[in-house]
Image (cartoon, helix red, strand yellow):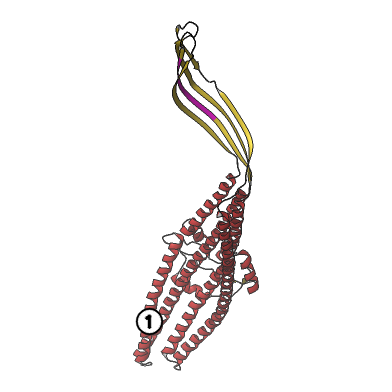
Amino acid sequence: MNRLMPLARLRPMAVLIAFAWGAPAQAQSLLDLYHAAQSYDSAYQSAQAQFAATSAKVDQALALSAPTVNFQAGLKRGWEQGSSSTDSTSSNALGIPYSSTDSTSDKAQTDGVLGVQLSQPLYNRFNDVTLTQAQRGVAIAQAALSATQQDLMVRVSSAFFDVLAAADSLAFVRAQKAAVAEQLASAKRNFEVGTATITDAREAQARFDLVLAQEIAAENDLTIKKSLLNQQVGIANAEPVGVRLPLQLPSLSGGEAQWTATTEENQPQIQSKRVELELAQLESEKSRASAAPSLALNAAVGKSLPWGGTSTSSNSTGVTAANQAYSNSISGTNTRPGDGQSASVGVTLTIPMFTGRTLDARLKETVALEEKTRNDLETVRRNALQTTRTVYYGVQSVLGQVKAYEAAEVSSQSALDANKLGYQVGVRINIDVLNSQSQLFDTKAKLAKARYDVLVGGLKLRQAAGTLAESDLQDVNALLDK
């Protein structure tokens, strides 16, 4: 929780803001608009989708080490026909007998096969590295989502307080216009009664016309700032709640060394680059793992269901050697195979022997990319630390400006009161009063803007350090009117 540092009371400023800003009937707090932006901002939605997609890769990598079971079913129809012929002769005193055999075979068969196969990796270094890479990828996506969320907080907060600052500026311009109009009327009355010259009236008129132009510019600036806020949060007519007066600003705790140390530890971009370096190292390990042995358990059961069979026929003709009688015989067979079952279980060891030097070339590439990522990490780290230092000193500067503007506001108010009194007694001229009025309202506008810059700057400092959370928005939200 931030420690709060009380500041000077701003009752005149409260009256002026109420004049132009007021209290909208359905005004939204900073947290309300941030929550609306979460469901509208496309960059934040994209980061969430990317995180979900990257998380799914872990399940894909886990599946590489899980058992796989496949069911197989097949049906095959085959037909085959063949023929053969055999002739034989023998010679004796009675003559030359002979014999001849002709055979034909027809095979028509339909085979059905059913089977289940299981494979379970027992050791595979490549799959293990792939799983680790997927887990590191989730860490990178998480860092990107955190960075996007913090950026959304800062963008909404900046747009929120830009609208309040523009509304304050418009309120101060209108208050100045009222004061100048009063001074113009006084100068005209004094000229009519002869106690002042026409110069006073013309100077007041010129200043009044200038304030009118400033009012138009302030109204346009407020319209643009509201439009930008609407675009950030996805609401047609967002109306930010004004700050509660007197405003208390959170103090800036810790020094530069503490904030830079926090940045190096928590900044999402640095964390992401560190994980990228781990991924690059794992990619080198993965290249080495491609040449490592792998072991897997395999099992299968099956059943064959044949239909049909083989038909064989033979036709023999000839003359016997004993009596040289003619003979002719026909025979045939029909064979039908039966059903069959099979089962097997075993362990398969795979050892890569030669890969055409592809792995060596891939390893050289991954080692070089690892070195590149290491240098990229150092660049990101240095830039992040410098950004934190810049934002830190920027917040310190704005805090100093707030104190200076508070003192200047008191001095400007005293100067205006003195010039008004001097004008009434005739020792000051109208232009002195007009200049004092302009200086006072300009100081009030700068003071209000500086206070808002302190609030936004504190959020930006936490963003630079990587620690910005919704609780920080709640602390700022507590400073708003309820």
**Residue drawn 46% across and 58% down?**
42
Q: Secondary structure at mark 1?
A: helix
* In the foreground, 397 or 114: 114
Who is closer to the viewer here, 369 or 479?
A: 369
List the residue tagged with mark 1: 210
When the figure is inspected, residue 341 is found, relative to residue 406, above or below; the finding is above
Amino acid type at circle 1 is Leu
Answer few, some or many: residues within 10 Å of disc 1's Cα (few below 14, many 20 plus, some between 14 and 19): few
Q: Tell me if residue 276 comes above or below residue 291 in the rendering.
A: below
Q: Is residue 117 left or right of residue 210?
A: right
Q: Is 108 one of the magenta-colored residues?
A: yes
Q: Is residue 302 above or below residue 269?
A: above
The residue closer to the viewer here, 407 or 346, is 346
Quarter of the image with the N terminus in it: bottom right
Query: Residue 292 at x, y = what percent?
Result: 63, 50
Residue 472 visible? The answer is no
Q: Which residues are magenta?
A: 100-114
Single out the residue that lies furthest toward the front: 93
